Image (cartoon, rainbow, N blue to C red):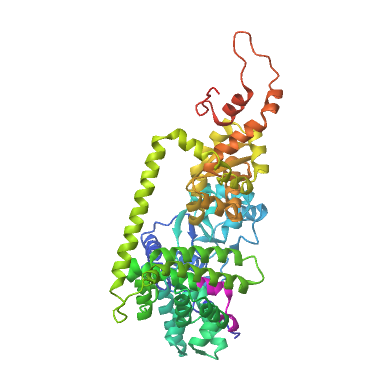
Amino acid sequence: MAYQALYRVWRPQRFDDMIGQEVITRTLKNAITTNQISHAYLFAGPRGTGKTSAAKIFAKAINCHHQQDGEPCNECDTCKAITDGTLNDVIEIDAASNNGVEEIRDIRDKVKYAPTVADYKVYIIDEVHMLSTGAFNALLKTLEEPPANVIFILATTEPHKIPATIISRTQRFDFKRIAANDSYQRMIYILDQKKVTYDEQAIKVIAKAAEGGMRDALSILDQALSFGDNEITLDNALLVTGSVTHELLATYVQQVLSGDTKAALATLQSVLEAGKDAERFTEDVISYARDLLLYQQAPQLVEGAEMGSVSDDFQALAKKTPAQTMYAMINELNAIQQQMRFTTHPDVYLEILTIKLAEIGRQNGAAPVATAVPATPNAEAPSAPQPAAESSDVTELQHEIDQLRSAVKHLEQAPSTAKAAAAPAKPRVTKSAPAKEVNLAKIYPVLGSATREKLNQLQEVWPDLLNSLSITQRAVMKVSQPVAAANSGVIVAFDYSFLYQRATTDHELTDALENGLDRMIGTALPVVFVPKEDWPTIRKNYLTAHKAELQANSDTPAEPEKPAENPVVTKAEELFGKDIVNVKAD
């Protein structure tokens, strides 16, 4: 027989074989035991966490006449046929390649026929989020009221792309990422069964590289076995995963934290010469920095993730590294990681990253060095002047703070003087920067045709739209709200500029918002982002710039008994509502 991959050979055949999904397996077993089986299920979660395996086990258990405590026997003809994929009553469909209306209509026509061999006819639709809108609509009625003895199991890695009308007609189970320790234990069990020699540290490297997917872990293990001729060593695991050793990673982080740019660049060069993947190296550094930060607050979390292997050097580094340094490092690492996705020269970005991280380390390490600058007559006791130097620094800073407070108080008491002094500095204020970043060419057409009714419609569906996003996307959009809307687009304002900058470069977020609007209001409106602090200025500039055009359009003469209406005010009220617009005399 031809060789089969490990993840196929060791695919779970019983609920008890599944790793890391105890809540889901227990619920499904109880439903089978008590005969409380629903007509439709939705299995959602990351790849390689057991969604399709759970669906096949469930199909076997409900059709097995010898099942015990909700578990299939795997010995009867029905169980074997489902395992081999030869039972006609259990139909697996890949929605990625069968996502049209015709395929779903075919299911709808055939679903009315009773099962031929099994008790239940089970449809397992994998990657169901790939179905088109028309296909979802064709599935809707059948999914809501299927014929007797028919069960639908939908599996997806992106549940936010599934219409709410479909989700509401199913029982949803969210599969979680598998903990590294659970993956480690499962791989140890498999290798012991295969009688393969292995290094435990190598298995830990593979478990962490799998990032919560059991199938990914077994695929990497399979590759390492092939590379090492049925022997798993640490070097082989590092080569296969593209990771670096924990010691080399610790050395690199210590060098950048101490501001030693030259040594850090040399370490980076040795990493690149060893053929390590640049993106993988960046992820390893981010993970290491995150572990340092977490260890300061919750050591047990890091010890659990590292499966008990936390070195003394790591503990010492975590104790002496300020949290602010780790925040700055993680932000820089994340920015470089985003840029590396679109480059063919990742080594250049890694070198720039190393220099920036070393600069962050130097800036945070400058304070203790500065305290040792004052000369001391007694060289044998260098620690004695340190408290005095720190005390003088604190006194000097306190004196500067007092001076600033008195200056602010003086300015508050003399506002006219403050205004006169601030007038020449006006051109220096960085208010013009957003004009370069905000795409006015997309904003002005929306303002030209925006209406209050359209904005009200958007504000009503906005909470539902945010709920349809992924957790990361929802976190970015949580501090935003629509401020203007038209049939040509919608303008969304962000409370914080850094989230606005992130949203403008996230094309997946924009696509998710426009697709969500298409599902909820029937139109995929283009979405334009603006910083909230700059929105009043943009709005005012638009009304001022188009004042002449608005006056020309308002050719209806005013009634004699009423004063002539200002077209700019009229347009503003049309855009934002009369309750928001406040007219003040010049």
State which quarter of the image contains the N terminus: bottom right
Corner quadrant of residue 127: bottom right
The answer to whether residue 466 is magenta is: no
Please indicate, yes or no, whether residue 519 appears anywhere in the rendered image.
yes
**Depth check: 412 or 199 in front?**
412
* Residue closest to the far front: 377
Q: Position of residue 319 (x, y in %)?
A: 34, 72
Q: Position of residue 164 (x, y in %)?
A: 51, 48
Name the side, left or right, on which 563 lies relative to 13.
right
- Which residue is painted at 32% across and 71% down in the image? 300
Is residue 368 placed above or below 131 in the rendered structure? below
Please indicate, yes or no, whether residue 77 appears anywhere in the rendered image.
no
* Residue closest to the far top: 561
Name the side, left or right, on which 394 lies relative to 149.
left
Corner quadrant of residue 566: top right
Corner quadrant of residue 571: top right
**Depth check: 183 or 554 in front?**
554
- Which residue is painted at 65% across and 62% down in the image? 97
**Depth check: 459 or 178 in front?**
459
Is residue 348 placed above or below 400 in the rendered structure? below
Magenta region: which residues? 271-283
- Which residue is painted at 39% across and 39% down in the image? 410
Name the side, left or right, on which 302 lies relative to 90.
left
Q: Position of residue 580 (x, y in %)?
A: 50, 29
Q: Position of residue 200 (x, y in %)?
A: 42, 85
The answer to whether residue 275 is magenta is: yes
State which quarter of the image contains the C terminus: top right
Q: How many numbered discs, if any?
A: 0
Prevailing SS of the magenta stretch: helix
